[in-house]
Amino acid sequence: MAQPDVSQSRLYEWLTGDEDSRMCDEIPDSACNAQPHNFFLHLWASLGNKLADELSSARLVLPWLMGIIGAPVWMVGLLVPIREAGALLPQIFVAGFIRLKPKRKWVWVTGALIQALAALVLALLALFATGSLGGALVLAALVLLSLARGLSSIATKDVLGKTISKRRRGTLMGWSGSVAGGATLAAGAVLMLFDSRPGNVIVALLLVVAASSWLMNALAAARIEEAPGAVEGGENGWDSIKLGLSLLKNDRTFLHFNLARALLLSSALALPYIALLGQNQSGTDLGGLGILIVVSGLAAMVASPVWGKRADQSSRSVMRDAAVGTAICCLLAASLAWLPDGWAQSTWPYAVVYALLVIIHHGVRLGRKTYLIDMASQDNRALYVALSNTLTGVLMLLVGGIIGALAQWFGSAILLLILAATAVGAVLSAHQLPEVE
């Protein structure tokens, strides 16, 4: 087992606020000495994953790709549901498989490599694909990427729970979000230099960088020192579903958490519609895309460490406060249509509200991730994560379809008002959750 050097331990203590880098809670004793070393490997892995996610975003980059290749508009509406649900739905079926692996990091590595491959395929499609066939191939590559994302997601949380102690996990995710936000900010700034010059070569380059970032994620994950875990209790997919349903029935906290998480989908569902309003002002120009990427990266860089620190103190409060922010942002976005013509026709007002909601959405993600990991134990964490994610995937498909129909019938402004009301329900639900830290 590698021993962290003095400078690494001091940096770890500064980042986490620890006075003793050997302070451990609910991780094996064998993982305690390696915690500073693993902390930075998790940081690098998360940096690669978050940067890749932003540069292949179904909310921003892929709609621009679809526009460049001339894909039908209805295909653009499938990007976010496929991206989210494809990553979440299969997780209950792989939870039992992962449970049979003493070291789960290799499942994580496999998922990262497949995501890198899918991103390279998307880059090639940006260069050579056109029309409906090109759009269909983009959706197929996104399905592969999303399924691999789900494989990595459940393994990542399991490894995190085994190698990083309580009250350090939210801090870790916060710092990784901040560093990734800085890298995303730089990428968006470069795109803004291209202003009104759309180009499939530039979008392809973004996707190649995303593939490289997932390779970095895989390399860092492979180097994490993970103690072998228990392999008893592995279930096949259907047995896992039965066990998961019994957990929902018997564990009221878990059931209540999933209700709050479902209502918090309003933040994820609102983002692409605000981006769409901004896209209507700039078309497929890379300058408009660059603006949205810049504000997204800046928001992540500033917000994530703050949310992470707060999540280690009370992830329930983070979920509640993020729900309040979601409601406010949805109301602001819905009101942009009443701005004077000069402002309403600019990308910037939409970019500002988009940035605010990105800040809030990071709070939603950090709060519910930290709550779920801390609520579960080492023995049932993989199943809890898989079941919760699968339920969210089902809801994403169902609610995403309903939201799309509402947007078609009533317009984006009315839809955002509906999502604001949903966020208010999330406030009430999250406030009633018990503390788990």
Image (tube, helix red, strand yellow):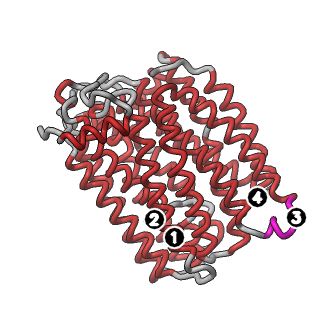
Evaluate if marks 1 and 2 touch, with contact meaning CB atoms under 8 Å apart. yes
**Residue 431 image position (x, y, % from top left):** 63, 23
Q: Is residue 6 magenta?
A: no
Of circles 3 and 2, which is in front? Answer: 3
Circle 1: element type: helix
Residue ID at (49%, 75%): 203
Q: Is 284 rendered above or below residue 259?
A: below
Tag 1: Cα neighbours inside 10 Å, few (<14), some, or many (≥20)? some
- The residue shown at (35%, 25%) is 380
Which residue in the structure is indicated by mark 4? 408
Amino acid residing under circle 2 = Ala
Foreground: 60 or 366? 366
Residue drawn at (28%, 25%), measured in percent from left and top? 23
First of labels 1, 4 by sequence position? 1
Q: Earlier in the sequence, mark 4 or mark 2?
A: 2
Would residue 166 be seen by someone viewing this image from the given angle?
Answer: yes
Label 4, residues with CA under 10 Å away: few <14, some 14-19, many ≥20: few
Give the left or right position of residue 177, taking residue 152 as reference.
Answer: right
Q: Which residues are magenta?
A: 339-345
For marks 4 and 3, the one nearer the N-term is 3
Going by the numbered disc 1, the residue's amino acid type is: Ala
Residue holding disc 2: 140
In the image as oriented, which residue stretches furthest toward the left? 1
The picture quadrant where one finds residue 423 is top right
Locate residue 75 relative to residue 1 in the image: left or right.
right
